[in-house]
Image (cartoon, rainbow, N blue to C red):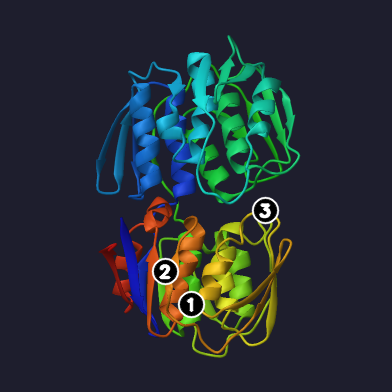
Amino acid sequence: MDQIVIKGGRPLNGEVSISGAKNAALPMIAATILTGGAFVFQNVPNLKDIDTICRLLADLGAKTEFSGSTARIDTTGLDRHEASYDLVRKMRASVLVLGPLLARLKRARVSLPGGCAIGARPINMHLEGLEKLGAKISLAHGYVEARAERLRGGEIFFDIPTVTGTENIMMAAALAEGTTVIRNAAREPEIIALADMLNQMGADIRDAGTTVITIHGVKSLQPVSARIIGDRIEAGTYMVAAALTGGKIRLAGVDPSHLKPVIHKLREAGAAIESNDTVITVEGGGAIRSVDIKTLPYPGFPTDMQAQFMVLMSVAGGLSVISESIFENRFIHVSELRRMGADITISGNHAMVKGVKRLSGAPVMATDLRASASLVLAGLAAENTTHISRIYHLDRGYEAIEKKFAALGAVIERVPSV
């Protein structure tokens, strides 16, 4: 198992190309299940989670092929309805195959999902939504079993916005008979990207990106070619790195409108930010100011940026309060940041962060995907050397992170654990 070793304290400067968004690619790849034929995707990130979803599709009977950042997926022979535990346990987003399998094959058997240890994240809203569309759902031996001779449109109200739940229902409803209305739908850019692809396939989905999405079911869909949008969370991580190290980083291949709350808070913290349609430039160098944040569903401050922003606040002037309202276990990185000298106190879902003059390198252990990124950032800003173990989490969501940071001037390498 590898680890990342960082000698910190250097300002980062230069340009970084942002990879395709994992959280857009996963549902779009799952959507290929809805019809047989050959799909082509551009700007696909080379990540463990992408490998997992493609292996899952292959297990269902599809053929997948990669060439650089291009993926070709042929679902002509997809005829199996069971997503096995061995694959689904590795990634919670595997549950995205449930809706399209049910719509195409009229049955699905999907293992209850795994993934990062940042909270329960139950899929009950997915199941209740599919039941509203006429599916018969049962849970047995760790699997969700669903059947429906014909899905029919219905009205679905989510208690809280759920991204994968909204995506699952959109895909299933695309081939349902009649009209489906999703109320309190998730509004993320990845939802819009999936809806755009489905509409290109021949679906009739309206108002994606708002709290009320309407889907008029169609009889059939066709395969398409599509491009994955830039990863706003990867971009946000490099934006924090510029502010944290006092450098200047130009980020290419990302839509600034997807990052409005992050841009706002970084400017509050003292960073200078300029942007156009596909490029963001972030410059640090001045005093870092303490600001408070509260994670919220999109378009609020993303929970996936909370850990990274906490690192920035750990060396800011004064006291900041970070409130986590999405996942109950998303402060598990705090103990590792404390090992590096951060002054952080937890009270329920609030973290009080008192800025210190500098962090100090230490051996630390990653606990989930975004916690891993926060430890890399902390190592880049810290004095001396930081050793980060269990970095397999990083490989689920950040493409070649050590190479990209090295190109910006960081002293960082991936080495075998001893």
Secondary element at tag 1: strand
Secondary element at tag 2: strand
Residue visible at 34% across and 41% down? 51
Quadrant where the C terminus is found in the figure: bottom left
Position of residue 374 measured from the top left corner of the image (x, y, whole percent): 49, 67
Q: Earlier in the sequence, mark 3 or mark 1?
A: 1
Horizontally, is 194 left or right of 1 in the view?
A: right
Residue 277 in view here: no
Q: CA distance from mark 2 to mark 3?
A: 31 Å
Q: Amino acid at mark 3?
A: Glu
Q: Amino acid at mark 1?
A: Val
Horizontally, is 352 left or right of 363 in the view?
A: right
Q: Find disc 1 in the rendering and name its residue.
A: 282
Q: Find disc 3 in the rendering and name its residue.
A: 328
The residue furthest top is 149
Q: Find disc 2 in the rendering and name its residue.
A: 251
Quadrant where the N terminus is found in the figure: bottom left
Secondary element at tag 3: loop
Q: Nearer the viewer, mark 3 or mark 1?
A: 3
Examine the image and state in which quarter residue 230 appears: bottom left
Q: Amino acid at mark 2?
A: Leu
Residue visible at 63% across and 66% down? 261
Residue visible at 55% across and 38% down? 195
For disc 1, the neighbor class at 10 Å (few under 14, some 14 to 19, many from 20) is many
Residue visible at 38% across and 23% down? 60
Along the line of sight, which residue is nearer the eye, 127 or 194?
A: 127
Q: CA distance from mark 2 to mark 1?
A: 8 Å
Q: Are marks 2 and 3 in contact (CB under 8 Å)?
A: no
